[in-house]
Image (tube, rainbow, N blue to C red):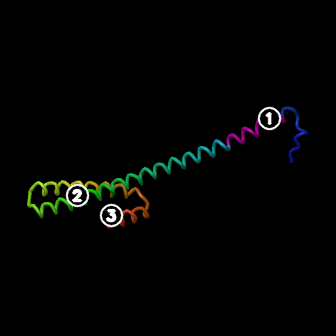
Amino acid sequence: MLNFSNLKLRGRILFGYGVPLLLTLAATSAVIINGQKVEQQGIATERGWSLVQDSDRLELTLHKRQSMIRAYLLTGEERFLQQYEESVNEYNKYIKSLETAVQFSTPERKLFLLISIIE
């Protein structure tokens, strides 16, 4: 065991500065590691938020499709048919966007997203 009273002045000084230095390095490494974890969580959260936004847009586009086809069937006006076709293109665009985003997700997220799209 280290006996502090038996150390020379040089050893005491080195020991006195060494302990706070080691504690500072340990605290710094803990902060860096936690910062990296927070950054990874931020990226995952951003990715999740993107999926939520795209699925919301997909839902709105699906509702628009239904409304336009109903309007066309009730009135027979061509403008509703054109708007329906535009909404089909939007819907397909959002589906492709979601498929791309889901490919970079975990299997659990893929299952959840597929279930929410089906509902």
Q: Quadrant of the C terminus?
A: bottom left
Q: Badge 1 is on which residue?
A: 14
Q: Earlier in the sequence, mark 1 or mark 3?
A: 1
Check disc 2 and report its element: helix, strand or loop: helix
**Amino acid type, mark 2:** Lys
Q: Is residue 95 visible?
A: no
On the image, the x and y values in percent for residue 69 come to 16, 62
Which residue is disc 2 drawn over?
Answer: 64
Q: Image point 29% across, 59% down: which residue?
A: 59
Q: Name the front one of labels 1 and 3.
A: 3
Q: Residue, x 86% and y 45% (percent of image)?
A: 2
Q: Which residue is mark 3?
A: 117
- Frontmost of labels 2 and 3 is 2
Kindly report the distance in space between the C-alpha atoms of the residues bearing marks 2 and 3.
16 Å
State the extent of the magenta-drawn residues as a range.
11-25
Badge 3 element: helix
Question: In the picture provided, is 2 more to the left or to the right than 50?
Answer: right
Residue extending farthest front = 74
